[in-house]
Image: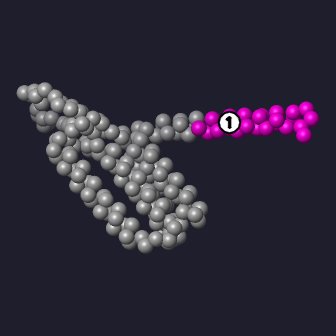
Amino acid sequence: MYGNGAGLEDEAASSGKLAQLQGAVGRKFQVMLDKSVPHIGQRWIAFCVVVLIYLIRIYFLDGFYIVTYGLGIYNLNLVIGFLSPQMDPESDGPSLPTKNEEFKPFVRRLPEFKFWYRSCKSFVTAFFMTFLSVFDVPVFWPILLMYWLMLFFMTMKQQIKHMIKHKYVPISWGKKQYGGKGGG
């Protein structure tokens, strides 16, 4: 069919150009992500805007409740990872008792940046899923909402008990200040 193989060469050249374009776009996106790391407030404001756009779309479409429910479950899982320590004290095994309590910084199982990135990615994915009618399954949304709220409160109760039992606080508001103005 292709006498001299020119068709195969054209196909290989176009797929090579596509791979180059995909690589260039991926690198530019990664540079943008890298530059956004120190700008925590701006990132979370952008996330709130993405969430608001998604919620407005869901409100006006009056559907896609299964997508929203799955999004809620996924983001609840991300919150749990964000609030959990990397090394679980219950699964570390027995340790030798010590007289003095040494300082152990809280290290999250899911760092803040990854939490933000995965949450944003999940909302953007769900937003694009609302353009496909296959995901608009008719359900009675109040039952899904009640079930999600039940999961949320039961999970948070368990997480708070774990925090109290092992004496850790996953949220810090910067460095502690010791002493007053005159103390020195």
Q: Position of residue 92 (x, y in %)?
A: 23, 33
Residue beneath disc 1: 19
Q: Nearer the viewer, residue 33 or 107?
A: 107
Q: Secondary structure at mark 1?
A: helix
Write the residue at 45% across / 61% down.
Answer: 68
In the displayed structure, 60 sits above or below 7; it is below
> From which residue to which does the magenta span run?
1-26
Residue sticking out furthest to the left: 99
Which part of the image, by quadrant, shows the C terminus? top left
- Dot 1 crowding, Cα within 10 Å, few <14, some 14–19, many 20+: few
> With respect to residue 18, does 147 lie above or below?
below
Residue 164, image x, y percentages: 16, 46
Is residue 52 visible in this depiction of the protein? no
Q: Seen in the image, is 6 located left or right of residue 31? A: right
> Which amino acid type is shown beneath numbered disc 1?
Ala
| Relative side of 96 to 46, left or right | left
- Residue 8 magenta-highlighted: yes
Q: Is residue 106 magenta?
A: no
In what quadrant of the picture does the N terminus appear? top right
Asked whether residue 18 appears in the rendered view, the answer is yes
The residue drawn where x is 33% and y is 44% is: 82
Q: Position of residue 84 (x, y in %)?
A: 28, 43
Residue 55 in percent (x, y) is at 46, 63
Residue closer to the observer: 29 or 40: 29
Majority secondary structure in the magenta region: helix
Residue appearing at x 37%, y 67% in the figure: 145
The foreground one among 40 and 74 is: 74
